[in-house]
Amino acid sequence: MAFSSGSGRGSPMADINVTPLVDVMLVLLIIFMVTAPTLSYPIDVNLPQKSINPPPQTKTPPPPISLRIDASGQVYWNNAPQPLDALQGLMEAEVQKDPTNQPMLEIETSPDSDYGILAKVLAKAKNAEMEKIGFVQNQ
């Protein structure tokens, strides 16, 4: 179906009416702007606070704990395989030795490991009140 341009020759008008397209795009933009903030949710993170006078280091820190997660999902606590359910007990035992001088938990993951296992390990560390957690990256 062609539109006439108003001239007497009867040639079709090839202009597209973009007004409905712009209206639809603006409505979609407003919908995305309204719904995007509701898709994100905050995560509470305890960041270290600035200290003007740091406490003196009188105690030597205990040796770090090596926690490795391989591609199959097996968790190794200081190179000894451990079930995932036993980790929180091990972490709580380390924290109870000296709550003010905790060892560093060094987590190393395989690039092919499942993120869900790492999330469970971090949740167990938080529940055990471990404060020093680091990630090890081997190249």
Image (cartoon, rainbow, N blue to C red):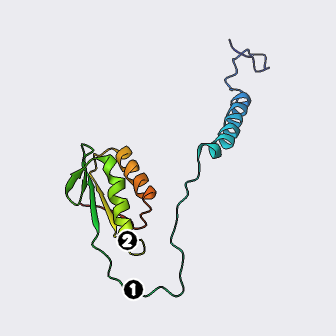
Q: Please, what secondary structure does the residue beneath circle 2 have? A: loop
Q: Residue at x 53, y 82 (%)?
A: 51
Q: Quadrant of residue 6?
A: top right
Q: Residue at x 59, y 48 (%)?
A: 41
Tag 1 residue: 57
Q: Is residue 63 above or below residue 39?
A: below
Q: Is residue 3 above or below residue 36?
A: above
How many numbered discs? Answer: 2
Mark 2: give few (<14), some (14-19) or many (20+) Cα within 10 Å: some
Q: Residue at x 72, y 28 (%)?
A: 20
Type of amino acid under label 1: Gln
Q: Is residue 75 left or right of residue 132?
A: left
First of labels 2, 1 by sequence position: 1
Type of amino acid under label 2: Gln
Distance of label 2 from label 1 (alpha carbons): 13 Å
Out of 5 and 100, give the one closest to the viewer.
100
Quarter of the N terminus within the rendering: top right
Q: Please, what secondary structure does the residue beneath circle 1 have? A: loop
Tag 2 residue: 102
Q: Position of residue 47 (x, y in %)?
A: 52, 68
Mark 1: give few (<14), some (14-19) or many (20+) Cα within 10 Å: few
Q: Residue at x 39, y 48 (%)?
A: 120
